[in-house]
Every structure is written in structure tokens, then in C-alpha cells.
Image (cartoon, rainbow, N blue to C red):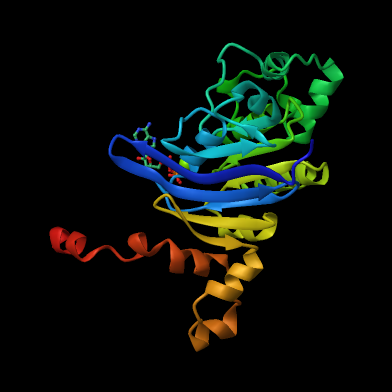
Amino acid sequence: MTHDVMIDIQDLRVKFGNHTVVDGLSLEIRRGEVFGLLGPNGAGKTTILAAIQGLRRPNAGTILVDGLDVAREPFAVKRRLGVQLQKTAFFPMLRVKEMVALFAALYEQFPSPQEIAALLARFGLESKAEARPGQLSGGQQQRLALALAVVNSPTIVLLDEPTTGLDPQAKRGVWGAIERLRDEGRTVLLTTHSMEEAQVLCDRVGIIDAGRLVALGTPAALIERHAPPLAAAEAARREPNLEDVFLALAGRRLAEPAEDYVADAA
Ligand SMILES: Nc1ncnc2c1ncn2[C@@H]1O[C@H](COP(=O)(O)OP(=O)(O)OP(=O)(O)O)[C@@H](O)[C@H]1O
Ligand SMILES: [Mg+2]
């Protein structure tokens, strides 16, 4: 059976102790879309991705992945997912090509050396097949994490800040790789702090603040609906963008410290 909603989150609630981090989130990610989860630091994005993977048990709510209940069928769900975590721990003694082979083997796949080379080339790592993780730059490690995330040909790919810290060229390379995943019919759920990236890459975005969904739609629709009017001088120079929307809806607490905070600092 196929499902048009590939990730179906209903009334999700996650607490750490007394702290409610995801506060009644309902969100449906559609087949074949690139969906961007936006939100300030600590908004709950990584926690939501962990819950989708079954790594973080919700306090309430349900998550279906391709129609499968994450709580009931965690292994079947994991087989459908490819994941790039915000921080990836690699095996320090393995070479890059060995790591690809190992990750593939975890999914009972045994790619040929040519297939491994092709996967690495796709992420600009063709010259690093023999390197160990400690010999890769930060951006190269991130691209390796992305390569490992798609090693099992997942139908759904979860990417936690896939381009943070990348140089402009590497970032474009990752964008291209993500577009290719979409072209192949896969569903991509990513988080990002780059509003430019969200605007360029995502079919739809959801803005999360303090564990709640505060806006949902295509970047164009959100700009249309939520971007505050620009001052005349600024309007002459540029169009309203997704960053305006983000700051209006979610960035307030950072942009304008609360009164008591200011008082404490004085
Ligand atoms: N293991 C944990 N134990 C306790 N609190 C946690 C734990 N993991 C996350 N939190 C808290 O949950 C909240 C949400 O964290 P989360 O990592 O989901 O945010 P995020 O939106 O991914 O932020 P960022 O943009 O900084 O990556 C934060 O307040 C964080 O301190
Ligand atoms: Mg995070």
C-alpha cells in the first residue's frame, strides 16, 4: 500500500522532565516533497526528528511513517528512513570506503567498489575513499554523513542541518544532492537555519517555536501571508523574504530580550 502522507505526526508531545519540548505538534509530510523544519535554537526540531526515528519515545501522540506506527513497528520504520544527524560520530579507524560498506551491510546491501565510488563522487568525496574520518574537514565529514544517510536507498530522508558549516560550493553540492533525492521520488525532511536554503530548496516549510507549529506552507505563501511590510527605503532595495517571516513569528525572543532579562543585565 502506498501513502501520500509519508510522515504523519498527530498531537505529538515530548517532555524532558517537567520541560515540554514538543507541545502538541500535528504535521503531515507529503510524498515526494522537500519539507523544511525551521525554528530557533532549542525549538524542538532535533527532538521531533528523534521521535520520528523512534529514538525518543513521545509522552503523547502518534507518528506514522509510510503508514507504519513508529511505536509498534520501529524496525520496519527504520528500514524506510535515511538519517543524517546534527552530529555524527564516525568510527575513527575505518576508511571512508569501509564506512560506506559497513553502513550498507547494516541494511544487508553489498555494493561493489564501483558503486561505493559512485556514491562518494555524488557527494564530492571521490578523492577521500581511503581517508579516515579524522583526516576529513568538517564539511567533508558532513558530506560523508549525507552519503551514509542514503546508502540504503531510503524512501524518506531526514537531514538535521545538512549544510551548516559548509562552504558555498559544498552547500550548492548538497542542495543538488537533495534535489536529486526529490527527483528520485524520495521524501526529504530537513532542518535548517538558512532561510535562503529553505526558500530555494523546500516545497513547504513549517516554523516551530517552543515546540509548537506557528506557520506552515510554501515559502511564497508564508511570505505573502506573514512578512511584515518593509520600510520604504528597504522596500526599494529588496523583496520581503522568509527571514522576515521567521523573525516576525519566531525570532522575537532572541531579537528583543524580555524586559526582565534587560533589567537583570543593567
Ligand atoms: N536529552 C535531553 N535532555 C534534556 N533536555 C533536552 C535533551 N535534548 C534536548 N533537550 C532540550 O529540548 C529542547 C529542544 O532541543 P532540540 O535539540 O530539539 O532543539 P533544536 O530545535 O534542534 O535546536 P538547534 O537549532 O539548536 O539544533 C532544548 O531546550 C533542549 O535543551
Ligand atoms: Mg537541532
Q: Residue at x 62, y 37 (%)?
A: 64
- Give the percent coordinates (x, y) of residue 106: 68, 15
Ligand 1 rendered quadrant: top left
**In the depicted structure, whether residue 82 falls above or below residue 198:** above
Given residues 190 and 57, the one toward you in this image is 57
- Give the percent coordinates (x, y) of residue 187: 72, 43
In the picture provided, is 29 more to the left or to the right than 121?
left
- Give the percent coordinates (x, y) of residue 146: 66, 33
**In the depicted structure, whether residue 159 falls above or below residue 229:** above
- Give the percent coordinates (x, y) of residue 25: 48, 49
| Screen quadrant of the C terminus | bottom left
Given residues 190 and 195, the one toward you in this image is 190
Please count the marks in the image. 0
| Screen quadrant of the N terminus | top right
Q: Residue at x 51, y 82 (%)?
A: 229
Q: Does residue 1 appear in the picture of this structure? A: yes
In the picture provided, is 251 more to the left or to the right than 125?
left
Q: Residue at x 53, y 38 (%)?
A: 62
In the picture provided, is 205 more to the left or to the right than 255?
right
**In the depicted structure, whether residue 211 falls above or below residue 256:** above
